[in-house]
């Protein structure tokens, strides 16, 4: 720019102006000095307030751990609650617990955030107004006194104390009845065992003892009954690094692609209505060999190809006594056939335990149907609803709401005014599980104490306390639990006599092993087996609908949890929505693409508009819709995430996240069914893009992107058992160079220094995403909302990549791979950071220094794994209650800063400090990252690669070990162990 | 020439004020609180307790062994001594002498600062809990503060044998505690680089890690 001549008039811009006679330089100088002066002011005075009297075990700044159990679903996995300075900040699996063995699923991890939900009811509500407890007790007491026909409707209690409170309550109120139903019902499975063995219980699945599992529509690794326990057993039965190496054979027959189906070695798709028929055909091949006489003639042709049936029968017969056939269908015919097959295979007593059965589902759908009939007839005087939400859960929701208006007294125990509580006269909110005393007996003989970790945040009252108050004998939950344990549990524990010692030990350990109470089963009665001779199929032009639970939402009771709403589905990778999943061929036939909105209509229900998701691996004549969406009040998430000009709301004000699929359920004579035979799909012409976290599903790089035509990137490697037996390194890409001594950019590590690394066994990982939520809780990862996810700005430090490939018989093969910062030795991110905000630690960690970062994002661009996350905004931390869930050991990042997995460096530091203080070296396995701790499959191992004795060093030497994109020479510290499918030959 | 002199004078004034202003006015660059010496709710004297009476630091600040925070002791810890010691020795002795002269039992003398402690605990004149009074914790003013993005843990420093005075200064001479050091990152790192004498090798030095993630995570 040329300077104006000296004699010329000043440029108008430079001329002094009237009114504001300050030029730019003066302004900047003044502003600079003013800012300096302001910056010199002292920060606000901070107070330090110690306790007046400090209990011995309470040391400020340290963690206190309480053994408890999770109430996220009825499985009741054991937990350890990490409390810091009086508030729980993390839930971890209790490694000693016989069910969960240290794992905890995504829902369990996220239930911590439910504790700090500021919209939970803080006081009881009577006729729409918050009141005090005595007022509610008077009103409810009067109503109960007047009621002759009282019904108590709950989900499965499986709690000795609550069952006892219910018994006393029923005894105090003649004419009262207790009805149990599970929104995710296993009623037919229970009824089948009632008919065949005389015991209405679920046999406990011992997958760890199995060598062959065949599952019919049972998502046992994801959502069915006790997924953490099943995953632990499954991983044990497929442990190739164990002694001896084992590899369970798993076949899945299902209508949609479930996370469990994604793990199967063989997979076939059938319609939901064809499952009983397929089971009858399988029974016809297996029962005669066991000498069981069942009339199995006159069957319709099998929905499964004969070759498939032969393979299933052969595999199962070869694994007699160590096989397992499971069925998630709620049809009595299917369940009795499954029981007959398991009986014929000799699985009862081995892989199916009736001596110590599971009590995790006790719902009785026939009793529910009767209750609905009574309600509609107006034959109920008082209804108490606990743990379920029938107006939302059931097909009859709308008519039930009308029926509830006719009931003189409806009491809800919900923690918020949900769909059913809105129709209730009184809402008596229960405290969160971490706020009260409870207990559980998820498996007969395993009694777990659930102790509180903090005082109730609101004026809430436990279910058993309310029942006791209304039975005329008020007693606190603590006293009730102790009474039950003194009178009912203690006598069942061999060798225990002194109650106080027994109680203290139980609190310390979290559970006791007692004698199971159910009586012995009677001999199998084959005459009770029902045979399905035909299948239910949709008419031409129609589709069958499957309503299924998602890992993150289950039956919808966690819809108010933003962590779970933003957790990508393990298979579809979609967040913040449910959708109509269609097979690719069906979608092509109807001219639909992912994101197109369709109207799904079934007879007797109003049509619902849903976006389409094209889902490979689904049966072409089905449409699958997730349950648990469309919950009232989820418009609270309208403004979740950053607010800015172009930001879109996650959900419309007054709307809901997703749509409720419950109206498509049907309550049949033998139970609640989750499928519809005849559904029609109609195009609306509109579209609503889904917020998915993965847009590319194949490991093949398209020809347009890879320079010499298409390239296969073997990031998630796998092989088959036959090849692995011959060569343990099978599956490694051809031409892979044996690693020599590559040149090193950095000085050699000091002797004795740690070298942190991680190994992830892809053969064990089920994609359940527990690690992702555990990481989110541990590392204060923000929730960004639907719009930001669509802009690919989700913040999860650990993501579960999912790839599709073609499998045998044209079925789809699914690969899951947890992807996190690989902590490269030659990290591409480090060399491009202009301010050294990301650099290498002396222990092999790739560190991210937030207070140095200026937000160039060069590092994210240069990262081959795309694991870096940028804070595009100051993500909202305005809810003081929700902020209590933040981990004080981890900085809350501000806008303009890059972040990523730190390998839980705060835990590494804590472990090292503990060892220094103790004066002894760190033990292998002493430091566990959050993802490793919560993994139900024990697929993740963290440790010191420099220690040749460590588990991680052994895993890194395993012939299955490889590193992702190793060919780039970035020397990652994360090892993956190749997946081995139990197949005889490569299919491709 | 005059221009140069003026420039030199301006720069010198700048340096002089940079050196003097913090000392004279208490103004600092953002984040630096060196010399911060706020009044506390109870005029507790470290000179008396740690200096004259030589009570070990860890007697009251036992958290330094067990936690990241050394912590301010709970009022119950004070009561271990102050259940008996209610005033300065000279005051109680004067009362004893006077009582002897007046042929009566000596009255309990309570120093005004200690009365604040008893009030906080809700104790009556007999030093027993008084249900009429409400106990109220003592709100001390925090002196040593680190920014939220820096994590400091007392345990490894105590385990390495770093004396409390190394960071907190001659606390045993301070009537009222003040922040002695800058507590800046440069100051931390200097010490981490210099290290402490290694216990296992005579004359050796054990240096601490200077990895960023040791303090920043």
Image: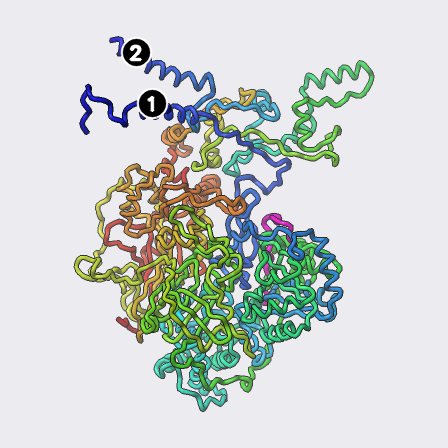
Q: Which residue is drawn at 68% across and 62% down?
A: A165
Residue B65: mark: none
Whole-percent x, y for residue A555 in the image: 51, 64
Which secondary structure is most common in the magenta stretch?
A: loop
Q: Extreme left residue here? A: A708
Report whether residue B127 is seen: yes
Can marks 1 and 2 be said to lie on one chain? no
Crowd tier of the residue under label 2, counting other residues whose Cα lies within 10 Å: few below 14, some 14–19, many 20 or above: few
Q: Is residue A84 above or below residue B112?
A: below
Q: Position of residue A546 (x, y in %)?
A: 45, 72
Q: In this view, does A554 lie to the left or right of A689?
A: right
Name the residue: 33% across, 14% down. Answer: B10
User: Could you tell me if residue A921 is visible in this image?
Assistant: no
The circle on residue A26 is 1
**Which is nearer the eye, A899 or A652?**
A652
Q: Is mark 1 on a helix, strand or loop?
A: helix
Q: Mark 2 lies on which chain?
A: B
Q: Report the front residue among A247 and A773.
A: A773
Q: Do the residues labelled 1 and 2 touch (CB within 8 Å)?
A: no
For the residues labelled 1 and 2, the Cα–Cα distance comes to 20 Å
- From the top left corner, tell me how far across and down residue A244 is, in percent: 39, 66
In the visual, does A573 lie left or right of A144?
left
Residue annotated with mark 2? B6
Q: Residue at x 32, y 74 (%)?
A: A589
- In the image, the segment drawn in magenta is A444-460
């Amino acid at each position: 720019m040329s300077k104006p001549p000296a004699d010329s008039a000043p440029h108008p811009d430079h001329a002094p102006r009237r009114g504001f006679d300050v030029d730019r330089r003066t302004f900047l100088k003044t502003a600079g000095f003013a800012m300096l002066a302001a910056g010199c002011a002292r920060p606000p005075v901070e107070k330090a307030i110690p306790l007046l009297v400090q209990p011995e075990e309470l040391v400020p700044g340290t963690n206190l751990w309480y053994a408890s159990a999770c109430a996220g679903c009825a499985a009741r996995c054991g937990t350890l609650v990490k409390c810091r300075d009086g508030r729980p900040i993390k839930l971890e699996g209790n490694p000693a617990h016989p069910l969960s063995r240290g794992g905890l699923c995504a829902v369990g991890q996220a239930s911590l955030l439910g504790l700090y939900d500021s919209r939970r009811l803080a006081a009881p509500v009577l006729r729409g107004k918050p009141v005090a407890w005595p007022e509610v007790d008077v009103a409810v007491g009067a109503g109960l006194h007047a009621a002759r026909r009282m019904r108590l409707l709950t989900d499965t209690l499986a709690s000795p104390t609550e069952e006892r409170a219910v018994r006393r309550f029923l005894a105090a109120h003649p004419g009262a009845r207790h009805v149990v139903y599970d929104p995710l019902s296993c009623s037919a499975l229970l009824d089948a065992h009632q008919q065949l063995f005389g015991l209405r219980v679920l046999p406990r699945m011992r997958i760890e003892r199995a060598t062959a599992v065949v599952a019919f529509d049972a998502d046992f690794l994801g959502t069915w009954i006790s997924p953490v326990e099943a995953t632990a057993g499954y991983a044990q039965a497929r442990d190739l690094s164990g002694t001896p190496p084992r590899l369970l054979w798993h076949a899945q027959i299902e209508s949609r692609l479930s996370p469990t189906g994604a793990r199967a070695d063989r997979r076939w798709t059938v319609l939901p209505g064809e499952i009983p028929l397929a089971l009858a055909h399988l029974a016809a091949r297996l029962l005669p060999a066991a000498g069981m006489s069942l009339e199995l003639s006159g069957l319709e042709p099998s929905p499964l190809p004969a070759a498939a049936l032969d393979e299933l029968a052969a595999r199962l017969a070869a694994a007699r006594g160590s096989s397992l056939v499971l069925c998630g269908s709620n049809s009595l015919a299917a369940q009795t056939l499954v029981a007959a097959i398991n009986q014929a295979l000799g699985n009862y007593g081995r892989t199916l335990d009736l001596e110590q059965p599971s009590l995790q589902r006790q719902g009785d759908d026939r009793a529910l149907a009767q209750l609905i009939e009574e309600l509609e007839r107006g034959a109920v005087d008082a209804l108490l609803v606990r743990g379920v939400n029938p107006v939302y859960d059931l097909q009859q929701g709308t008519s039930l709401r009308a029926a509830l208006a006719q009931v003189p007294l409806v009491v809800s125990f919900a923690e918020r005014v949900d769909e059913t509580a809105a129709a209730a006269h009184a809402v008596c909110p229960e405290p969160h599980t971490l706020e009260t005393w409870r207990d559980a007996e998820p498996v007969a003989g395993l009694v777990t104490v659930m102790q509180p970790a903090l005082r109730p945040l609101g004026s809430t009252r436990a279910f058993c306390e309310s029942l006791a108050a209304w039975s005329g004998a008020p007693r606190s939950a603590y006293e009730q639990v102790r009474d039950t344990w003194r009178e009912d549990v203690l006598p069942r524990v061999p060798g225990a006599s002194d109650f106080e010692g027994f109680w203290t030990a139980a609190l310390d350990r979290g559970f006791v092993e007692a004698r199971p109470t159910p009586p012995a089963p009677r001999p199998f009665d084959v005459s009770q087996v029902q045979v399905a001779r035909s299948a239910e199929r949709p008419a031409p032009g129609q589709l069958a609908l499957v309503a299924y639970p998602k890992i993150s939402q289950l039956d919808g009771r966690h819809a108010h949890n933003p962590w779970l709403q933003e957790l990508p589905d393990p298979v579809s990778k979609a967040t913040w929505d449910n959708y109509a999943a269609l097979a690719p061929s069906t979608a092509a036939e109807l001219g639909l693409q992912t994101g197109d909105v369709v109207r799904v209509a079934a007879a007797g229900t109003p049509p619902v508009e849903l976006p389409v998701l094209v889902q490979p691996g689904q049966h072409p004549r089905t449409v699958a819709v997730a349950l648990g969406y469309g919950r009232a009040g989820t418009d609270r998430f309208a403004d979740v995430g950053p607010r800015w000009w172009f930001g879109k709301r996650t959900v419309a004000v007054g709307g809901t996240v997703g749509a409720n699929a419950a109206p498509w359920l049907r309550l049949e004579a033998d139970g609640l069914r989750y499928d519809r035979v005849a559904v029609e799909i109609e195009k609306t012409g509109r579209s609503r893009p889904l917020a998915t976290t993965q847009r590319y599903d194949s490991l093949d790089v398209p020809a347009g992107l890879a320079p010499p035509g298409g390239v296969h990137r073997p990031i998630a490697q796998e092989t088959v058992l036959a090849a692995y037996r011959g060569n343990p390194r099978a599956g490694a890409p051809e031409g892979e160079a044996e690693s020599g001594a590559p040149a090193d950019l950095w000085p050699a590590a000091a002797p004795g220094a740690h070298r942190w690394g991680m190994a992830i066994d892809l053969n064990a990982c089920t994609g359940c995403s527990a690690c992702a939520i555990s990481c989110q809780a541990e590392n204060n990862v923000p929730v960004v909302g639907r719009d930001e996810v669509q802009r690919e700005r989700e913040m999860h430090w650990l993501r579960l990549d999912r790839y599709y490939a073609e499998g045998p018989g044209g079925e789809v093969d699914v690969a899951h791979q947890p992807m996190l910062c690989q902590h490269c030795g030659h990290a591409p991110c480090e060399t491009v950071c202009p301010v050294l905000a990301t650099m290498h630690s002396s222990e092999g960690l790739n560190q991210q220094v937030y207070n140095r970062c200026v937000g160039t994002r060069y590092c994210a661009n240069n990262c081959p794994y795309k694991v870096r996350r940028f804070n595009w905004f100051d993500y909202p931390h305005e809810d003081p209650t929700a902020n209590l869930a933040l981990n004080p050991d981890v900085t809350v990042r501000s806008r303009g800063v890059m972040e990523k997995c730190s390998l839980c460096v705060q835990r590494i530091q804590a472990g090292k400090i503990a060892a220094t203080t103790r004066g002894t070296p760190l033990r292998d396995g002493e430091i566990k990252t959050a993802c490793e701790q919560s993994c139900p499959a024990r697929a993740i191992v963290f440790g010191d690669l420099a220690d040749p004795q460590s588990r991680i060093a052994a895993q890194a030497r395993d012939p299955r070990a490889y590193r992702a994109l190793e060919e780039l020479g970035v020397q990652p510290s994360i090892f993956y162990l190749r997946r081995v499918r139990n197949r005889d030959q490569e299919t491709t | 020439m005059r221009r140069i002199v003026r420039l030199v004078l301006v720069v010198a004034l700048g340096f002089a004020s940079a050196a003097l202003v913090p000392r004279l006015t208490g103004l600092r660059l953002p984040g630096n609180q060196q010399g911060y010496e706020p009044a506390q709710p109870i005029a507790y004297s470290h000179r008396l307790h740690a200096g004259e009476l030589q009570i070990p630091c860890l007697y009251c600040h036992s958290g330094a062994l067990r936690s990241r925070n050394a912590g301010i002791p709970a009022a119950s810890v004070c009561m271990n001594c102050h259940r008996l010691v209610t005033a300065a020795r000279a005051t109680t002795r004067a009362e004893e002498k006077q009582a002897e002269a007046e042929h009566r039992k000596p009255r309990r003398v309570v120093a005004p600062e200690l009365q604040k402690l008893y009030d906080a605990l809700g104790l009556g004149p007999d030093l027993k809990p008084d249900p009429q009074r409400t106990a109220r914790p003592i709100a001390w003013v925090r002196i040593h503060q680190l920014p939220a993005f820096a994590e400091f843990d007392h345990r490894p420093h105590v385990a390495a044998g770093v004396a409390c005075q190394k960071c907190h200064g001659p606390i045993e001479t301070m009537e009222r505690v003040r922040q002695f050091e800058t507590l800046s990152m440069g100051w931390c790192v200097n010490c981490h680089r210099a290290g402490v004498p290694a216990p296992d090798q005579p004359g050796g030095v054990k240096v601490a890690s200077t990895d960023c993630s040791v303090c920043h995570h």
